[in-house]
């Protein structure tokens, strides 16, 4: 009998990674190809994902993180193993600090050769830990779709940031029937869900509303997170219903005009120094906001962080 008639068509891990990314909405990928991810990049391009090549992983990582900020979708950085992963940490840490969605995908050495001095061997999961919201390693080809889905989802959930996916050489070479691969990808797509809302959220909102109602000199501060979430309409409605003055951070500029009657931009220091309750939306109490500490802020000010 003809073997081609009895053996179902199969694909390897490279194709399954590309299928998973494409099926879950990835359209662009940044990076540097080489061992062991050259075929992965080729397979991704064959499925319509645009691969944008760079001379080094650092610049590719910065581009991927900026793509994440500009589009709201995770920017994908593809690197080779070892030094490629290390060079990609610049972009991953940039995404982490700036809360931009990004996923770094790196090939790694064969799992059977860990600890034996394999080509460009490195404990990449440990190397990225300080700069990643979630670090996943696909230890078998059948784990690829679920791992891809988890890092993509985590990169945009809650406060966005960088995530990492490690795919060993042997997993990229493992084969699986095309029908099983398609089934795994379809199952992942159907099972994707938004993060559940915490049961305590209603009580937290009620406490925040109560605090604002009792405030004598409230202030609304909004920043990059509010801009990223496109919350301008909600902020405008909140300000105009409550009459609470507002103050944007530099990255929150433009959500509401500085010429608005409730804008406190021209009296920033006075507004910060005198308010007794500050609702902070999509901004962190970092150096731009004097860490929320006196003497710039009143020592008894209360903050509501949203």
Image (cartoon, rainbow, N blue to C red):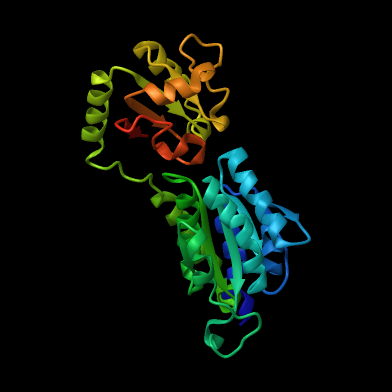
Assign the C terminus to one quadrant of the image: top left
Q: Which x, y percent locates residue 214? A: 23, 20
Query: Left or right of 192: which side holds 223?
Result: right
- Where residue 86 sits, quadrant-wise, is bottom right
Percent position of residue 190, x then y: 41, 50
Seen from the viewer's position, the closer of residues 44 and 214 is 214
Specify the farthest residue to the top.
261
Residue at the spot 55% in from the left edge and 57% down from the top edge: 20
Say which quadrant the N terminus sits in.
Answer: bottom right
Residue placed at 26% from the left, 37% from the top? 201
Q: Is residue 242 above or below residue 168?
A: above
Q: Residue furthest bottom?
A: 116
Q: Position of residue 124 (x, y in %)?
A: 55, 72
- Above or below, 297 against 151 in this view is above
Q: Is residue 278 above or below residue 69?
A: above
Picture quadrant of residue 271: top left
Q: Is residue 243 left or right of residue 176?
A: left
Q: Can the viewer see residue 264?
A: yes
Image coordinates for residue 255, horizontal then vertical, percent: 53, 23
**61 or 298: which is nearer to us?**
298
Which residue is at the far right? 55
């Amino acid at each position: 009998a003809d073997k081609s008639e009895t053996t179902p068509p199969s694909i390897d891990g490279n194709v399954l990674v590309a299928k998973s990314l494409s099926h879950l909405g990835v359209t662009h990928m940044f990076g540097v190809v080489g061992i062991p991810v050259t075929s992965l990049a080729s397979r991704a391009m064959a499925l319509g994902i645009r691969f944008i090549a760079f001379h080094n992983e650092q610049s590719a990582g910065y581009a991927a993180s900026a793509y994440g900020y500009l589009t709201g979708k995770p920017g994908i950085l593809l690197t080779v193993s070892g030094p490629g992963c290390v060079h990609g940490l610049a972009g991953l840490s940039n995404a982490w600090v700036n809360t931009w969605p990004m996923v770094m995908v790196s090939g790694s050495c064969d799992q059977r050769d860990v600890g034996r001095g394999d080509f460009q061997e490195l404990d990449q999961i440990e190397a990225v830990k300080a700069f990643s919201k979630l670090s996943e390693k696909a230890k078998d080809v059948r784990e690829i779709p679920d791992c891809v889905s988890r890092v993509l989802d985590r990169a945009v959930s809650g406060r966005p940031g960088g995530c990492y996916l490690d795919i060993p050489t042997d997993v990229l070479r493992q084969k699986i029937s095309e029908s099983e691969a398609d089934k795994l990808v379809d199952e992942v797509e159907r099972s994707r869900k938004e993060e559940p809302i915490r049961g305590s959220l209603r009580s937290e909102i009620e406490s925040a509303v109560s605090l604002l109602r009792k405030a004598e000199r409230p202030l609304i501060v909004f920043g990059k997170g509010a801009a990223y979430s496109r919350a301008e309409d909600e902020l405008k409605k909140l300000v105009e219903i409550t009459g609470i003055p507002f103050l944007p951070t530099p990255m929150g500029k433009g959500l509401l005009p500085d010429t608005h009657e409730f804008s406190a931009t021209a009296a920033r220091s006075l507004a910060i120094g005198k308010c007794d309750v500050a609702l902070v939306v999509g901004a962190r109490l970092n150096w731009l906001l004097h860490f929320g500490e006196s003497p710039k802020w009143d020592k008894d000010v209360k903050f509501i962080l949203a």
